[in-house]
Image: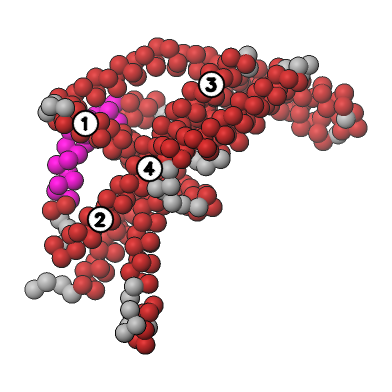
């Protein structure tokens, strides 16, 4: 005998709560699998196009994998050494920048730089700490994010997970479709299509926007002549998936570096600032509307709230999935509101005959 709908919903709710608890307990262990699934989802349309062109699913997956490996090798040989060198040089130069800031404050605001003042003591402590522990700081930053074993696991597991998920993506979708309750199949398929549009609008669109912005910022800052411009530009591009944060963090970091490097050339400082102004204008007026569009349909405040909640619950993994999950919740919320406004609870018994 089939369970009543209310009992089924209760058991489904319990199952989802248990799943959320398991994911929360796993933490960053599931990061390679989340990353692999995101890559497979991102590349599935490419595989579908290759299939329509006459390739089998296996051949399409192999072609995509080969191109991805080739691109990674080129990036590793060209970009990664430059990035690491600039990052190390930036950390080594931090004490010098601290000394320059101290000299500037002493020249412009001497009252704040008296020998016994708290500001002078603080700057001295920062400079000495950075000078004595610059190498240790770089090592700590790297090892605190991932241990060597975790990095190796990430590098190995992500491509393998992405390969097998991409290979079986259509089959998995068909299996899940076969689990849908038959009386509500079309409704659930419609919701799934809307969720797919939302996720495609964000995941594929935002990754493309981030790549374009990171390339633009890095190249522009390097052309302007800013030291460590490649590092700053790539950082700004990578974190631009968080609304406004990429441009703000990158702009502050770049302008701060420009103040030290181009202090006697204010027009160069303006050029550095102009890079981020132009980047934000291009992103807001062209890239985001064209590549992301309004399919996500989330208010910036709700986006920041989702990032805070998912980040606090699931760490870095939560930050990665926050916006797609919030957009998915938004799809189901809009569906629930639509059903509510069409129902008797909202319309009332007295208005049912007026429609």
Rendered location of residue 295, percent (x, y): 39, 48
Return the residue nearer the eye: 339 or 106. Answer: 339
Q: In this rendering, would 173 be left or right of 22?
A: left
Q: Earlier in the sequence, mark 4 or mark 2?
A: 2
| CA gap, disc 3 and disc 1 | 32 Å
Does residue 172 show up magenta in the picture?
Answer: yes
Q: Quadrant of the C terminus?
A: bottom left
> Is residue 221 visible to the viewer in this orientation of the structure?
yes
Return the residue nearer the eye: 72 or 288. Answer: 288
| CA gap, disc 3 and disc 2 | 41 Å
Residue 190 got which mark?
2
Tell me what residue is drawn at x 33 percent, y 76 percent: 343
**Residue 290 placement: quadrant:** top left
Residue 218 got which mark?
3
Q: Secondary structure at mark 3?
A: helix
The residue that disc 1 covers is 49
**Magenta-highlighted stretch: main secondary structure?**
helix
Rendered location of residue 148, percent (x, y): 39, 25
| CA gap, disc 4 and disc 3 | 25 Å
The residue that disc 4 covers is 201
Q: Earlier in the sequence, mark 1 or mark 4?
A: 1
Tell me what residue is drawn at x 36 percent, y 66 percent: 338
Q: Which residues are magenta?
A: 156-176
Q: Secondary structure at mark 1?
A: helix
| CA gap, disc 4 and disc 2 | 16 Å
Q: Earlier in the sequence, mark 3 or mark 1?
A: 1
Q: Residue furthest bottom?
A: 350
Rendered location of residue 97, percent (x, y): 71, 21
């Amino acid at each position: 005998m089939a369970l009543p709908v209310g009992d089924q919903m209760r058991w489904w709710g319990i199952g989802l709560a248990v799943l959320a608890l398991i994911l929360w307990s796993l933490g960053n262990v599931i990061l390679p699998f989340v990353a692999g699934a995101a890559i497979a989802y991102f590349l599935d349309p490419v595989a579908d196009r290759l299939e329509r062109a006459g390739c089998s699913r296996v051949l399409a997956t192999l072609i995509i994998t080969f191109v991805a490996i080739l691109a990674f090798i080129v990036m590793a040989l060209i970009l990664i050494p430059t990035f690491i060198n600039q990052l190390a040089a930036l950390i080594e130069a931090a004490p010098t920048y601290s000394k320059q800031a101290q000299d500037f404050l002493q020249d412009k605001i001497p009252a704040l730089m008296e020998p016994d003042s708290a500001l002078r003591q603080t700057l001295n402590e920062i400079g000495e700490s950075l000078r004595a522990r610059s190498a240790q700081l770089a090592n700590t930053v790297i090892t605190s994010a991932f241990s060597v074993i975790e990095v190796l696991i990430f590098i190995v597991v992500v491509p393998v997970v992405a390969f097998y998920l991409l290979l079986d993506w259509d089959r998995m979708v068909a299996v899940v479709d076969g689990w849908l309750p038959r009386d509500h199949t079309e409704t659930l398929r419609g919701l799934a299509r809307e969720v797919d549009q939302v996720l495609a609008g964000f995941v594929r669109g935002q990754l493309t926007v981030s790549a374009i912005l990171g390339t633009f910022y890095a190249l522009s800052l390097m052309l302007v002549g800013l030291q460590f411009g490649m590092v700053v530009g790539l950082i700004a591009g990578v974190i631009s998936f968080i609304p406004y944060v990429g441009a703000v963090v990158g702009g502050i970091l770049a302008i701060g570096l420009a103040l030290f490097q181009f202090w006697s050339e204010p027009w160069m400082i303006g050029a550095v600032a102009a890079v981020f102004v132009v980047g934000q204008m291009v992103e807001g007026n062209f890239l985001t509307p064209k590549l992301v569009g309004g399919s996500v349909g989330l208010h910036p405040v709700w986006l920041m709230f989702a990032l805070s909640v998912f980040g606090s619950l699931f760490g870095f993994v939560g930050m990665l999935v926050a916006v797609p999950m919030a957009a998915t919740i938004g799809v189901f919320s809009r569906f629930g509101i639509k059903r509510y406004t069409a129902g008797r609870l909202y319309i009332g018994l007295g208005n049912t005959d007026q429609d």
